[in-house]
Amino acid sequence: MDTFTLSRIQFGANISFHILFPTITIALCWFLVFFRLRHGATRGTPAALGWEQAYYFWTKVFALSFALGVVSGITMSFQFGTNWPGFMEHVGNIAGPLLGYEVLTAFFLEASFLGIMLFGRGRVSDRVHLAATLMVAFGTTLSAFWILSLNSWMQTPAGYEIIDGKFHAVDWLAIVFNPSFPYRLGHKLLASALTAGFLIAGVSAWQLLKGTATDGTRKALRTAITAVAIVIPLQIFMGDLHGLNTLEHQPAKIAAIEGIWHTEKGAPLTLFGLPNEKEGRTDHAIQIPKAASLILAHDIDAELKGLNEFPGAHPPVAPVFWGFRVMVGMGMLMLAVAWWGAFVLVRRRGQDLATLPRLLLFTLVGMTFSGWVATLAGWYVTEIGRQPFLVYGLFRTADAVAQHPPGMVAGTLVAYLTVYVLLLVAYIGVIKYMAEHSTMPTAAVAPPAPQAI
Amino acid sequence: MDMTWATALPLIFMAVMGLALLAYVVLDGYDLGVGILLPLASDAEKDVMVASIGPFWDANETWLVLGVGVLLICFPKAHGMVLSALYLPVAVMLVGLILRGVAFDFRVKARDSHKATWNRLFAAGSLVTTLAQGWMLGAYITGLQNDTWGLLFALGIALTLPAAYAMLGVGWLIMKTEGDLQHKALAWGRKVLWPMGAALAGISLATPLVSHTVFAKWFVLPELFALLPIPLACVGAFFAIRHVLHTPRVVQAGYGWIVFVATVVVFVLAFFGLAYSIYPFIVIDRLTVWEAASATESLVVIGIGVAITLPVIIVYTVFMYRVFWGKARELTYGL
């Protein structure tokens, strides 16, 4: 393999590994804020202990996820330079300030208040601790704001001029709030809520099945199912808006998603099939006539542009085509499971959650990491769908790569992949272990030796 | 040269970058130093050592992101040149940082039988990170030369930095712990003292030899006399550290912080010496600060952000350190 392909795989692997953890922590932190507030509101009643248990357990998961997000994020700030020096040399005037504002406004905020949030409860007042927790939640969300602004700008560039091949900023408001940004930010934040929600629901269901559930487990499960049941229809709606925006600005991506090879009026919707890029057709396609035009343009006879309009400037079809179907399929599954869970909860209001149908509990356990699958699939659609460009339509990915010997890139790729696989196994293993041993230390059972985090 | 924003801003950002990296080296330096010392302690002491840095390490590491971020944002050409040339040590450092960072959390959350493994990974990650950072610093000072002397020099600094970070870790532990562990920290400090001193002296002498540019800046009159306080102050700080390490009385009297502060002084002086040696280059002999800088309008935008946020960051960093002031206590998530 050549250096370009290897560097792309390496960056893809790093960013895929990284996004798993922010996707959890962005929303999980707001769940923690909610647990804290409920704990405060129920103080003096038996329910307070439950909210405290929920807060305690999920803070541990949060701390672990946050650490993994931090260390995998640092990797990327270096890889811009080690593997993609052309990116900052050409786009640095625009990408730089956006990244800089992320570091200055978000990274320090979350990293500094994280210490107080995690370990400061015995050292500061309740109010200060709640403020610190809010700062961390606010910081993670702000971080998503800046990085998605940059990512969206690479998809739908605006507010720039090009002088001697370099991008210069003309209008910062247009750059930050570029055309695809509001949709991408909304889509990502909702994806985070779903990922964290299904994680909480899945782990809590596992605890109920294993008999290690506490009152906190039940409260967390109820909160999570309620949240995902509300968020999933919003997400489907937001995804539709995002798709319409993509059609307007990146028609080649839509053509690859839908497998539309030639421009046509009244284009059919391909549910499944095997994209055959060599022959320029989808084999064994199962299609609904005119449905793609209806969904994308809200007109059954609308003309949709095909890949033939973008010779040498459209993404590889198969990964985008499949990525989209995995994401949408997972979204539908989430909708079914979330509403089923919510329906059962409403029907059995006031009953002990341990009596929930085992089938539902096992299904929730199976869906524990469904948010990861949907998130990664969605990111592959949008990022591979941007190829062969780094900045859509303007700057090609191949022009940014550093020409290292392929062996060196391959060697570090193997090293990164090894570390990532081991950490992923350890992460899931430790969450399972914590779920099965979820006792809260109380004054009576606290270990005598100093216990550090 | 006329001082306009176009000429001043690159210099200002060079200073911001340098200070961010200095803050990183000092702050994460004590984290990494404690990590390097970890295998020398008993299991219970290991918990205390990690507890002493637990609330801080994440914020400390963020200074590295800021330093590299400024390089990336304000000097994109230099960012590409430096990091492409340091491809392998950067990759090694990143793997080390990853292992160190996650081991913090895994070591107390995994089952007990796995704790020893995570402790080892914590120490190994700290050491590997330090070695790689030393190598990168060495390669950077030689202007990224790949000849024998350049590589030997990089190797020399790679082997020096663990001793210097360990001394920062010792200074930190003296302040944050008490009893047996504090005594052990003093003993560790006595062991790394001379290796650190010898290595620092060696580097100071070798740097002008591997770089003619540096030689020409230091060994001319009258600059030499103006610069003399830098090495002299370093020697003074060194003997202050030595005195405290050999005189437990001083520590008991509440002056143990001198070890940490004096080590920081050595780092700060070395930093200013280096800054003087390199100016006005960002990659020595190859690329000046102005050649590497981004467009002025972008520097203005980020400059406004720095001017507003950096003071706020410093305020809440100080607040965070005050919350966890004093001897390290057990870390728990609960009430």
Image (cartoon, rainbow, N blue to C red):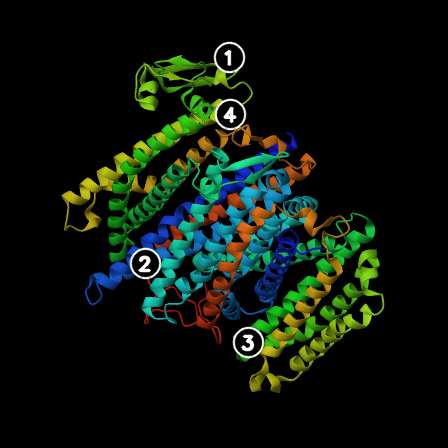
CA separation in Å, label 1 and label 3: 71 Å
Q: Chain of mark 1?
A: A
Pointer 1 residue: A279
Pointer 3 residue: B175
Say what secondary structure mark 1 lies in: loop
Quadrant of residue B24 within the rendered picture = bottom right
- Asked whether the viewer can see residue B102, the reply is no
Q: Nearer the viewer, mark 1 or mark 2?
A: 1
CA separation in Å, label 2 and label 4: 44 Å
Amino acid at circle 2: Tyr
Classify mark 3: residues with Cα within 10 Å, few (<14), some (14-19) or many (20+).
many
Q: Which mark is residue A55?
A: 2
Query: Sequence order check: which comes first, mark 4 or mark 1?
Result: 1
Labels 4 and 3 share a subunit: no
Pointer 4 residue: A315
- Asked whether the viewer can see residue A27, the reply is yes
Across and down, in percent, residue A108 comes to 48, 58
CA separation in Å, label 4 and label 3: 58 Å
Q: Nearer the viewer, residue B78 or B154?
A: B78
Quadrant of residue B279 within the rendered picture = bottom right
| Residue at image location 51% in from the left, 23% down from the top | A314
Amino acid at circle 4: Pro
Say what secondary structure mark 2 lies in: helix
Say if mark 4 contacts mark 3, CB within 8 Å: no
Labels 2 and 4 share a subunit: yes
CA separation in Å, label 1 and label 2: 56 Å
Across and down, in percent, residue B94 comes to 59, 50
Would residue A417 appear left or right of A34 to someone viewing this image?
Answer: right
Classify mark 2: residues with Cα within 10 Å, few (<14), some (14-19) or many (20+).
many
Say what secondary structure mark 4 lies in: loop
| Residue at image location 53% in from the left, 69% down from the top | B49
Amino acid at circle 1: Glu
